[in-house]
Amino acid sequence: MPTPLVSGAPRLYLGGMAIFPRPATPKALWQDVRAFVAQRQRHELVFGVLSVAITAAIVFAFYVDSRVKPPPPEPVFVQSWPESRSDAEIIAQQKIDQARRDAKAAKRQAAFQRLADRLGIE
């Protein structure tokens, strides 16, 4: 059988200690800050201020970004086709649509080719 850590009547280990420290005054806080700063090297203070500033900037950026309104949704229009379309009409429409897509892709490819020529990319 294990021996108990405390013999005798049970008592509180921290009976005489206060759980919360007494309230500090702003003057005592300022003295503590001055004493802390006086013990530090200059580069420690510079990097400490920089780290707080970078963190504050990131938090501020998230705050500002949360306040930006999202753009309104764009409606999507869908073409309505009659049920009685023949296969020939469907194929003819697909050829027209494919020609439009090919022209758009060729235009985009030409724009990228002009950019590559300006930058000297082969």
Image (tube, rainbow, N blue to C red):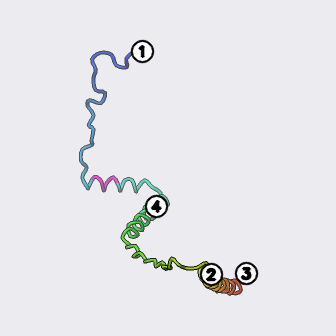
> Position of 86 compared to 77: left or right?
right
Q: Residue at x 27, y 41 (%)?
A: 20
Q: Nearer the viewer, residue 64 or 25?
A: 64
Q: Determine the CA span between mark 1 and mark 4.
A: 51 Å
Give the class, few, some or many, for how many residues have Cα within 10 Å of label 1's Cα (few <14, many ≥20): few
Report the residue at 24% width, 52% height from top.
Answer: 25
Q: Residues within 10 Å of mark 4 (few under 14, many from 20)?
A: few
On screen, residue 9 above or below 24? above
Residue at x-position 64% and y-position 82%? 95
Q: Quadrant of the N terminus?
A: top left
Which residue type does callout 2 highlight? Answer: Ala
Question: Which residue corresponds to mark 3?
Answer: 121
Residue type of the residue flagged with mark 1: Pro
Residue 71 horizontal side relative to residue 29, left or right = right
Residue under numbered circle 1: 2
Secondary structure beneath dot 2 equals helix
